[in-house]
Amino acid sequence: MIPAIEVRAVNKSFGNVEIIRNLNLRIEKGERHAVIGPNGAGKSTTFNLISGYLAPTSGDVLLNGQVVSGLPPFEINRRGLSRSFQLTNVFARMTVWDNVRCAVLWASGQRYAFWKSMDDLQDVNERTIRILEDIHLAARRDVIAGLLPYAEQRALEIGITVAGGSDVIILDEPTAGMSRAETDRAMALIKRLTEERTLVIVEHDMNVVFGLADRISVLVYGEIIASGTPAEIRNDPRVKEAYLGQEAVDA
């Protein structure tokens, strides 16, 4: 079966500094896969390589069996991959409604034209409403996005990410900075919105990782040292030594 994402012998250097070393990663379609590791391990660089914000120094990244390494991010997005970022990335001066509708418009093939009224696009507006209801922001539709509390901005960004209808969703630390209650709500939201899609997530909160992931890959100094089920990762001595520590594993 062709995987959703495959990273083949990828290396990435910045000048003489090698960040990613012979990275091999396979993520199956419909899988929820977490990438974990200590600070500086290369997790965000890996996400940037997969989504086109960086090009590999060598090696290939494949999306649904097709090489996408070297393509610009918008082209990779058109081929079925959407991502969020560590820092909240919404249109801060636009309303919640317009943030989501922009993503839905692009995904539906619509483009802005002065002779068209956006309000006449019934399918677009109905899908926008459904997404706002899914992320529990329907009542906040007319609020300027930059005025939302942090957790709601993150929920909005997740909504924008899935609004494009991509089969592959990658989320970079979606619960960073949230309280435990906010994190629990975000986990439930992510589970619901990514059903029947492929999810790849970078996250430091091990409760989130073990609560969401079907499989986990551990990245240390730019190399995958272990991949497996949550149970396998918990019990892997290399992971305990390099990252989790006995206290985290026993938690």
Image (cartoon, rainbow, N blue to C red):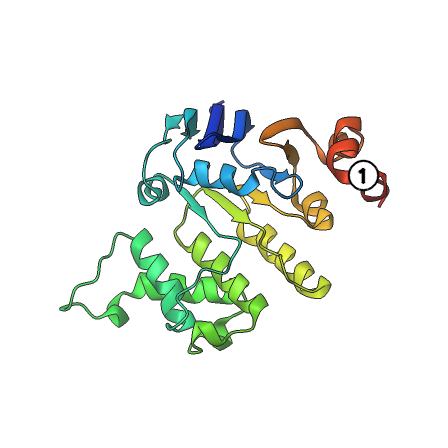
Does the image show residue 3? no
Q: Residue at x 43, y 32 (%)?
A: 15
Which x, y percent locates residue 128? 40, 64
Up-down relation of residue 37 to residue 22 (above or below): below
Image coordinates for residue 173, horizontal then vertical, percent: 59, 51
Q: At numbered mark 1, what does the secondary structure look like: helix, strand or loop?
A: helix
Q: Is residue 193 above or below residue 143?
A: above
Q: Answer with left or right where residue 154 lies relative to residue 232.
A: left
Q: Residue furthest front?
A: 16
Residue in view at x 67 percent, y 41 percent: 38
Say if 104 sits above or below 232 in the image: below
10 Å crowding of disc 1: few (<14), some (14-19), many (20+): some
Residue type at mark 1 is Gly
Return the x and y of residue 16 as percentages of the image width and height. Answer: 47, 29
Q: Quadrant of residue 99?
A: bottom left
Total marks shown come to 1
Question: Can you tell which quarter of the image residue 219 is in?
Answer: top right
- Residue sitting nearer the eye, 179 or 103: 179
Residue at left offset 42%, top offset 55%: 163
Quarter location, residue 151: bottom right
Can you identify the residue that label 1 sits on?
245
